[in-house]
Amino acid sequence: MNPIIDWKNIETVLLDMDGTILDLSFDNYFWRELLPKVYAEKNTLSLEQSRLHLTRSYAKIEGKLQWYCLDFWSEQLQINLAELKDSVREKVAYRPGAVDFLAFLQRENKKTILVTNAHPKSLEIKLLTTNFNQYFAALTSSHEYGYPKEEQDYWKKLQSHLEFNPENTLFIDDSIAILTAAKKYGIKYCYGISQPDLKQDIINTHPFEAIHDFSSLVSQ
């Protein structure tokens, strides 16, 4: 069941990218399947050994800005990750109803801003496939601000840069940790995504209400 949103109270809409407007299955495939395979071949490891090494490496800096940085991981693993991602960009896909929702926000003259932790090179690759930039007033990466969305300093810098009123702002993201940070900062309307990866099960977004399909928001 999708939440009911009172659109007359919303001036600004902040939208996450991966797992929110785009299906997270692309990123899960890249980090959990493709990269372990390539790393295993490069270092003469078994796939199991490669996955274990990468999983441990990811965990050490999870939630930090470096965790989302293609340049950092390219240096650590000695693999050009931007090039590797670009080689499979045809797998990038929208979540259900995302395009209609973006068009709806545009028609309603909502100030719509992309707020992602993704590295700018990753954002560029996604844009080459989806062309969603036409629906946004601005496209922002947390790498511009020096902090990930999990940290309060990110929200301070974002608000300073974009000048939005938290009381009239809607934020949608697939990460509970990030939604919690946004709510703590004062973003009034925060919603999760019930199924960020369409190939996996529905997730628990408590204490935030979850959106399953954007289509129902358009028809409210």
Image (cartoon, rainbow, N blue to C red):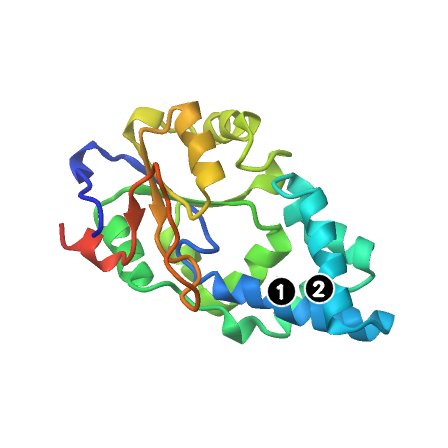
What amino acid is at disc 2? Arg
Could you tell whether 114 is left or right of 207 in the image?
right
Mark 1 touching mark 2, by CB under 8 A? yes
Res. 111 image quadrant: top left
The residue at the point 57 percent across, 40 percent down is 142
What amino acid is at disc 1? Arg
Check disc 2 and report its element: helix, strand or loop: helix
Percent coordinates x, y for residue 60 in the rendering: 72, 43
Q: Nearer the viewer, residue 101 or 183?
A: 183
Could you tell whether 41 is left or right of 200 in the image?
right
The residue at the point 48 percent across, 38 percent down is 178
Using the image, tell me which numbered label, if any, was put on residue 32.
1
Percent coordinates x, y for residue 36 in the rendering: 71, 67
Mark 1–mark 2 distance (CA, rounded to whole Å): 7 Å
Give the mark toward the camera: 1 or 2. 2
Ranked by sequence position, the earlier of labels 1 and 2 is 1
Percent coordinates x, y for residue 101 in the rendering: 27, 56
Identify the residue position indicated by label 2 in the image: 51
- The image shows residue 81, relative to residue 152, as above or below, that is below
Within 10 Å of disc 2 (Cα), the crowding (few <14, some 14-19, many 20+) is many
Check disc 1 and report its element: helix, strand or loop: helix
